[in-house]
Amino acid sequence: MRFFQLVALVWLLCACDNTVRQVKQPNAYYDVATFVKGQIDILEELKPTVSKALNIKGQQQTQKTNVINWSRELELFVQADINKPAFRNSYQVGRPDSLTFEYILKPGEKETVYSLRVQLDSVTQQPRQIEAVLTTMNPLYNSERRLLLESGPGKGNQWQVRHYNMTGFQQLTFFGKNDFSVEGTIN
């Protein structure tokens, strides 16, 4: 009889739900990724004409086009997202005013996003300007990318990207430094 009671007790204990429920924590930092992904959706739908200037390894190109893969074009801005659980305590937070968020990587931390600055519009509370510096340093490869994304009212007063600029370099340890810049203005 005791054996059956013991088996029943063990069975009841095993039947209890021990699953850990993940509680979604609020973002520690401004949610750049959601904003940029929303802008990608808007731009893919509108297909605006863009005046674009490229400079890669000293070779300059300019073009006007409305055929752009916006996911690829704004990919670095999505990579500037620092709202990941592993980064929760990696950045010093600054608020120079009520419309500006500044994040700088704490000393000793080794994340790709070195700094991020988001300036909001006073009326819409939407990002007017996003600036970021992304760095990668290891024994084989160094790179730095400086990003600027400017937004404002667009067609139909819809808030959208108006201008973006990406500059930087990539350097393999035993090879030369390759500078680049990409600038786009949405017409």
Image (spheres, rainbow, N blue to C red):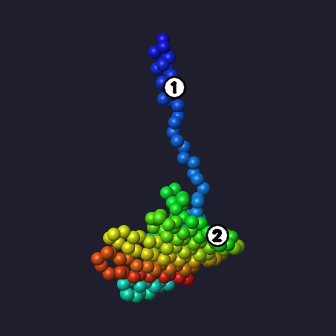
In this view, which residue lies farthest toward the front?
107
Give the mark nearest the N terminus, 1 or 2: 1
Name the amino acid type tagged 1.
Leu
What residue is rendered at 53% in x and 31% in y? 16
Q: Residue furthest top?
A: 1
Residue under label 1: 12
Res 159 seen here: no
Write down the residue under mark 2.
95
Residue 125 visible in the current orientation: yes
Q: Position of residue 85 (x, y in %)?
A: 52, 56
Mark 1 near mark 2, Cβ–Cβ under 8 Å?
Answer: no
Q: Pick whichever, 5 or 70, lies toward us.
A: 5
Residue shown at the point (38%, 76%) measured from the top left: 170
- Mark 1–mark 2 Cα distance, whole angstroms, equals 53 Å
Q: Residue 176: percent from the left, percent from the top?
A: 32, 81
Residue 19 image position (x, y, % from top left)? 51, 39
What is the count of numbered marks?
2
Residue 58 at what x, y percent from top left? Answer: 38, 87
Q: Is residue 27 above or below residue 67?
A: above
- 15 over 20 or under it: above or below: above
Tell me the kind of residue under disc 2: Arg
